[in-house]
Image (spheres, grey):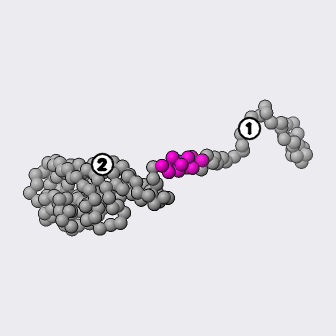
Amino acid sequence: MNELKKYDIAIFGLENKAHEYVFESGDAFFAAMEQQLIQRGQFRTRLVLDKSSTMIRLDFHIQGQVELICDRSLEPFEEPIDVTERLFLKFADEAGELTDEIELIPWDTQQINVARYIFDFIGLSLPMKKLHPRFRTEEDEDEEEEGKVVYRSGPEETDESDSPEPPIDPRWEALRRLNNN
């Protein structure tokens, strides 16, 4: 847990203005998070913390790469990450979460730790299907082929000059003559 201490930001007594922080992180970060999604990676986080009397706005920009295991071949590969996210911490009487972007923190909060936010943003940026880059062109071609199905409603449009007129059912022919008269 010592690794995550460097992500603590003392907000008590911090001036009401924008403050910039930069965090360099690696494998120790992912090990300290005690999770199984990502084991290895290197990234840099630029955080702009804008404090006011009623809330704190956090603007994250995370760049780097993480090592993932391919779902198809089980080989490790590097996945680039480039994430820009915004989060609001609003001072309130008790802690809670209003939306995905707005959290409530108690008025007497002394410090915040941004490690969990950084990890969550990285995790959400990863593809659902983890494919080694050499399989991605294959996968893209397969998806394009699947995407060529066209659905139409109503009568099919045809070029009148190329197709002969279909024979008319004799029962309808009598009605057509009545209608034309």
Mark before the other along the chain sequence, 2 or 1: 2
Image vertical order of residue 85 relative to residue 173, above or below: below
In the rendered image, is residue 92 in sight?
no
126 drawn magenta = no
Which segment did they paint magenta? 134-145
Amino acid at the residue labelled 1: Thr
Residue lying farthest to the left in this orientation: 13
Instruction: Identify which amino acid the numbered label 2 is placed on.
Output: Gln
- Residue 31's x, y, as percent? 28, 64
Residue visible at 16% across and 52% down in the picture: 52
Q: Secondary structure at mark 1?
A: loop
Label 1: how many Cα within 10 Å (few below 14, some 14–19, many 20+): few
Residue 100 figure quarter: bottom left
* Between marks 2 and 1 in the image, the one whose residue lies nearer the viewer: 2
Q: Point out residue 28 in the picture as x, y percentages from the top left corner.
A: 25, 61
Q: Main secondary structure of the magenta part?
A: helix
Query: Residue 158's mark?
Result: 1
Classify 10 Å Cα crowding around label 2: few (below 14), some (14-19), many (20 and above): some
Task: Find the distance from the CA under tag 2 to the CA under tag 1.
Answer: 53 Å
Depth order, front residue of 53/133: 133
- Mark 2, residue position: 63
Query: In the displayed structure, does residue 18 sit left or right of residue 66?
Result: left
- What quarter of the picture does the C terminus occupy? top right
